[in-house]
Amino acid sequence: MWDLDKFISMLYSRQLLPESTIKEICEKAKELLCREGNIQYIQAPVTVVGDVHGQFFDVLEIFKIGGYCPDTNYVFLGDYVDRGYYSVETIALLTCLKLRYPNRIQLIRGNHESRSITQTYGFYTECFRKYGNSNVWKYFTDMFDFLGLGVIINDSIFCVHGGLSPSVHTIDQIKMIDRFKEIPHEGPMTDLVWSDPLPNSSTFASDLDRSDFLISPRGAGYVFGREITRKFLEINGLGHICRAHQLCMEGYQILYDDMLSTVWSAPNYCYRCGNKASILEVGPNLERFFNVFSECPDNEREKPNTSEFDNRDSRRMDDLFQDVTENIMNKEIEINDIEDIGANSDLLNKDKDMPEYFS
């Protein structure tokens, strides 16, 4: 029997929903999301959440800190799955909340809401392990094709997963993108979920005010600087860009004289990075407060038997860093390799015509 409140209660208790229920939830979510545009316009107050990557108990911590839906309005910036142990429970809960409170919670697409990425970084394997087949993975990844690409708060704050694109100058151009498909290898849709800003660093002082984009070392998307950000905001009459996509050790980062910020919401990323996390609370008058938090206490967290996970899921982060460093230095840059790197890792040589900062 269809009972969203019951499903939500079960998921808060980390109970898996039956496969048939997941299928119905995803079908209803597609019907709902199909009626929403590529860009959703909402009003503050609202809380913006960055990457959560299947860290289910830390998502519960977010609700404890920021308030439960529908008492608090939320914008989730994507990357709901992969890397964490509980991607199924995480995306199922957020999808049910979207169905139950469609005007209180916004879900946009990240670069991990993709068939190709989730086959590499854990979601596919998790679905198969928990359900005995790949059907649940298919239901969710089909639904991902319906997720929007951005949110605008009070006609002022543009929320997107990754960043800007050389193919996109106006919000109206984003509205025209055909989003109902797998994320392509290139193009404006790809750039919005993959691109990154350059850091405020003396190393890149000469690049920050460039009017052109640089190729991203991730293998998809671009990197861009202060001048491109300023111009995009000016053309579109906006005041700020809020995005996710990059690990911030302090939980958030503010760039370019407060024109752009990054919010990161997965504490102790991959259960070993030791970083803080944050949620961005936007007040009625657009005042912004980064509410920083640490990982869920151990006594509130259920730890899985990690031996059940395949080698790819349980690889140590330092092994991943080594893999990516070797690939970069050999110029064998693939999306799936670049995606494994942690933030604040100075692995690139600027002489190779690439920025050093990415995650």
Image: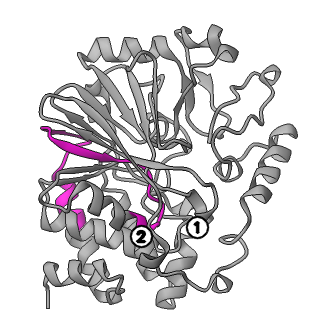
Q: Is residue 54 magenta?
A: yes
Who's the residue at 18% across and 49% down the image?
Answer: 36
Q: Is residue 340 above or below residue 333?
A: below
Q: How many marks?
A: 2
* Residue position for label 1: 119
Find out whether the residues at labels 1 and 2 contact each other: C-beta distance under 8 Å. no
Q: Nearer the viewer, residue 45 or 133?
A: 45
SS assignment at label 2: helix
Location of the N terminus (image quadrant):
bottom left
Residue 79 left/right relative to 202: left
Nearer to us of marks 1 and 2 is 2
Q: Is residue 305 above or below residue 235?
A: below
* Residue position for label 2: 56
Dividing the picture into quadrants, the one containing residue 283 is: top left
> In the image, residue 32 lies at what x, y percent?
17, 60
Question: Separation of disc 1 and disc 2 at Cα?
Answer: 19 Å
Residue 61 left/right relative to 70: right
> In the image, residue 243 lies at what x, y percent?
40, 37
Q: Is residue 234 magenta?
A: no
Dot 2 amino acid type: Phe
Who's the residue at 68% across and 79% down the image?
Answer: 310
Q: Earlier in the sequence, mark 1 or mark 2?
A: 2
Dot 1 amino acid type: Gln
Q: Is residue 306 above or below residue 319?
A: below
> In the image, residue 254 lies at what x, y percent?
44, 27
Location of the C terminus (image quadrant):
top right
> In the image, residue 13 lies at what x, y percent?
31, 83
Q: Which residues are magenta?
A: 29-58
Who's the residue at 46% across and 42% down the image?
Answer: 193
The crowding category of the residue bearing disc 1, from other C-alpha atoms within 10 Å (few below 14, some 14 to 19, many at least 20), is some
Q: Nearer the viewer, residue 339 or 286?
A: 286
Who's the residue at 63% across and 65% down the image?
Answer: 120
